[in-house]
Amino acid sequence: MRVLSLELEQFRNYAALRFSPPGGACVFIGENAQGKSNLLEALALLSTGKSFRAAREADLIREGAPAASVSADVRTRHGVARATCLISRVGDGARKKFLRDGRAVSYGQFIGGVAAVTFMPLDLQLVGGPAGLRRRLLNASLSQCNRPYYRDLAAYAGVLAQKNAMLRAPAAPDRELFATYNDQLAEVGARIAGARAAYVRKLASEAAIVHARWVGAPPELGVSYRPTPAYASEAPDAIANTLRAALLAAAPFEAKRRVALVGPHRADIALTLRG
């Protein structure tokens, strides 16, 4: 996959930019606050549909402008594709619109059309930081290359939000509805957990090769998926049944703490050296 051209309009500090990078690796050199990171942010935006550093999406729009646009022509294995993200101010926030080859598409259809990996100094926290960072890595990676995963992730997040809202409500949870939520979480969560486990196995294999090339002999780098709960088999039905049993057992504790405690939203990645 190669970027053939990048076009910015009212994006960050760029009033307008037309840029066609040369072949091979590109290194941007310049003074601070000149827009080097903004170029990389724009490319990442066309991959994941989100900024990797903006706290507010309205901050992506150049000061004083009503809207911004980012477009790129990208050569993929399927030919040349044009990806566009339009960002418009709405009150204090912003609204995004996505286009593929000039045709409006949903976020779910847009993500992954342009595959990209970003790495920032802050990403070193993937090793020692909270589990949420490592889950975000899995979700961002899998959503780009596996559209069913993104749909499952969105569905899981919706059900989880409903369940948590019920747990936080003053009234006692409706047992029948609570059971329905848990059944949906188990079914969708099993597919998420299975996809993650398979992905992490591939990641572990690649990471071990790179690590050995860098440091030579052991300690061997290990990367493994740590689901919550742990399961003995990766068969979808087996994972779903394990999740159902764990959700049932956790119900009293969830009611006490008023938050969902079991499922892929609590999983982690383990990074080890020599075990």
Image (tube, rainbow, N blue to C red):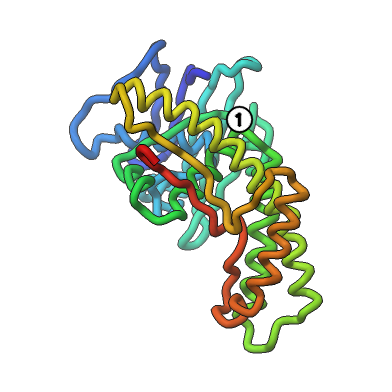
Secondary structure of residue under mark 1: loop
Name which residue type carries label 1: Gly
Residue drawn at x 77%, y 71% as measured from the top left: 179
Residue 77 seen: yes
Query: Horizontally, is 97 left or right of 268 in the view?
Result: right
Residue 67 seen: no
Residue drawn at x 55%, y 34% as measured from the top left: 201
Q: Which residue occupies the foreground of this view, 126 or 20?
A: 126
Residue 29 on image: x %, y %: 23, 25
- Identify residue for label 1: 113
Which of the image's four quarters has the C terminus? top left
- Work out whether 126 lies above or below 1: below
**10 Å crowding of disc 1: few (<14), some (14-19), many (20+):** some
Residue drawn at x 18%, y 32% as measured from the top left: 31
Residue 222 on image: x %, y %: 43, 37
Residue 160 on image: x %, y %: 65, 64
